[in-house]
Amino acid sequence: MTVFRLDRTATALQDRVTGLFEESREDVYRYLLTLGLRPARAQETVQEVFLRLYLSLKKGEDIQNPRGWIFRVAHNYGLKVRARQASEDPFNAGLDLQLASRTDTPEHELIERERLGQFHRAVEALSDQQKRCLFLRMEGLRYPEIGSALGISASAVGEFLRRAMVRLKKVRDE
């Protein structure tokens, strides 16, 4: 009888983690790419994050905000993975621009490329904390969740985002 209950509990736990995985894996993957992980490493890291979630829940850890927990672990583990891949060539984020469709006029393509290049340079010029806050906010996390993931207060998140938006608006308005 006890074995049946343990199996049912294990199945419920697997179902919960599977649901969270299906709901959040793409968001976590995109966030890991913003940290500088290569696509293959980011995919492996996503799997590791959800494995860690499963093991933590299996041990009985009470996780009040699973999405915030997932992003905090992804952030911390992603930084470790990024440090290990530092000796490799960096992922070329501008590759999308080279593979873009050629349906527009050459003039329009040039203007668009310049505009996107300006925006990418502006994003790269942000501080690491501003970028991390911005990318997590773009993934739909609220200020307290971002703060929890990065180990800072929600008010600090707000200030980082405010400064980032001021800089990006300047570039847009130029």
Image (tube, rainbow, N blue to C red):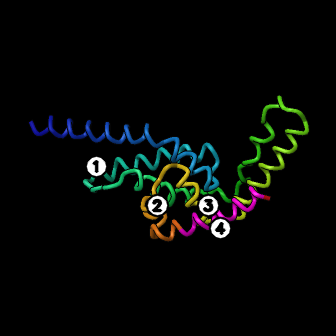
**What x and y, as percent, mark residue 133?**
55, 61
What secondary structure is found at the residue carrying circle 3? helix
Is mark 3 in CB contact (under 8 Å) with mark 4? yes
Judged from the image, the secondary structure of the residue bearing numbered disc 4 is loop
Q: In this figure, which residue is indicated by the disc labeled 3?
A: 131
Q: Which stretch is magenta?
A: 159-173
Q: In the figure, residue 163 lies in which quadrant? A: bottom right
Q: Residue at x 63, y 64 (%)?
A: 164
Circle 2: element type:
helix
Q: How would you rate the neighbour count of disc 2 (Cα within 10 Å): few for under 14, some for 14-19, many for 20 or more?
A: many
Q: Which disc is residue 31 wearing?
A: none
- For mark 4, what is the residue? 127
Q: Which residue is mark 2?
A: 143
What amino acid type should be assigned to the residue bearing mark 4? Ser
From the image, tell me which residue sits under label 1. 58
Dots 1 and 3: beta carbons under 8 Å?
no
Disc 2 from disc 4: Cα separation: 18 Å
The image position of residue 155, as x and y in percent, is 47, 70
Q: Quadrant of the C terminus?
A: bottom right
Mark 2 vs mark 4, foreground winner is 2
Q: Amino acid at mark 1?
A: Lys
Identity of the residue furthest to the right in this view: 107
| Quadrant occupied by the N terminus | top left
Mark 4 nearby-residue class (10 Å; few <14, some 14–19, many ≥20):
few
